Amino acid sequence: MTKILVTGSKGQLGSELQKLAPGHPEHTFVFTDQEEMDITVPSAVEALFAREKPGVVIHGAAYTAVDRAEEDMDAARQVNVRGTANVASAASKVRALMVHISTDYVFDGSGCRPYRETDPASPASVYGKTKLDGELEVILNTTRSLIIRTSWLYSTYGHNFVKTILRRAREKGYLEVVFDQVGCPTYAADLAEAILQIFPAAPGDARGAIYHYSNEGVCSWYDFALAITSMAGISCDIEPVLSSAFKTAASRPHYSVMDKTRIKADFGLSVPYWRDSLARCLDQMD
């Protein structure tokens, strides 16, 4: 039986892992959020790890306020870099495998083909830079670790694009959504299932091995919004607009589709198509 410690348990991924946990009696789970373990306090992290001695750590805790990070760089670094370093160091001391969740924002989005794990990272925002620096801390401070980059995460939990579109479409009946940012949505429930499938097969010498995971397919935020309202049966006029129509503090990648060849080949994953996953998520919201 493997003991799995999850950070950021109140987030979208953490919530989906909590939902899945009862169906995995072969594992025991320890779910933590800031109240149970402040990852920015080294002594708090070390004490909890020493007490629980997990075999696997799924590190989902992160500072994800992309625009706010531009003005509050230290807060973003405190969580995404220093906090991640604390978790990585503690995981190493108890010889745990660390599964670190990262993001497509480590790329600047200037590419035109799906990003591979070997492509140079070049973040265009403070958030992306702190997440990339967090990846480096994992590589430097762990003995066994996997880094999983994901994109456009949504679920029935927390705040996300799907919930925002549903609410605004019902309230306004008219929306403007950007069509020049292209990527792929990821249903957090699918990511949670994937993590639970791959960690038992992680190589013994894996250290900072990077993998990309999102649902299959490609779409713009406009396409995503159209699918959400259509599947939910909401009548709403949605106008495609350029990113320049919205002034944001942080730059977003215009293209962040990620190549999933490596994770599928190494772990035999079958990755669901984004529209199928969206339909399952919307069914859960009824």
Image: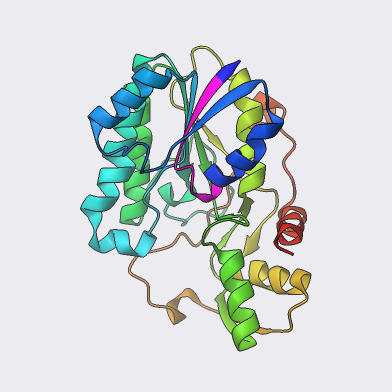
The quarter in which the C terminus is drawn is: bottom right
Q: Is residue 12 magenta?
A: yes
How many marks do you count on the picture?
Answer: 0
- Closer to the camera, 117 or 161? 161
The quarter in which the N terminus is drawn is: top right
- Closer to the camera, 212 or 172? 172
At x 46% / y 57%, what residue is drawn?
Answer: 110
Q: Is residue 185 magenta?
A: no
* x and y percentages locating residue 95 in the rendered image: 41, 14
At x 21% / y 51%, what residue is drawn?
Answer: 74
* x and y percentages locating residue 166 in the rendered image: 64, 73
Check the image and tell me how it is coloured.
rainbow
At x 65% / y 87%, what residue is drawn?
Answer: 173
Q: What span is colored magenta in the figure?
A: 3-13
Determine if residue 71 is in view.
yes
Position of residue 211 in the picture relative to residue 33 (left or right):
right
Determine if residue 262 is in view.
no
Q: Quadrant of residue 131?
A: top left
Q: Quadrant of residue 283?
A: bottom right
Residue at the extreme left = 74
* x and y percentages locating residue 170 in the rendered image: 65, 82
Position of residue 44 in the picture relative to residue 17 (left or right):
left
Where 279 sits versus 248, above or below? above
* x and y percentages locating residue 178 in the rendered image: 54, 74
Where 29 sits versus 13, above or below? above
Where 192 sits versus 247, above or below? above
- Closer to the camera, 91 or 81? 91
At x 38% / y 59%, what residue is drawn?
Answer: 65
- Closer to the camera, 139 or 119? 139
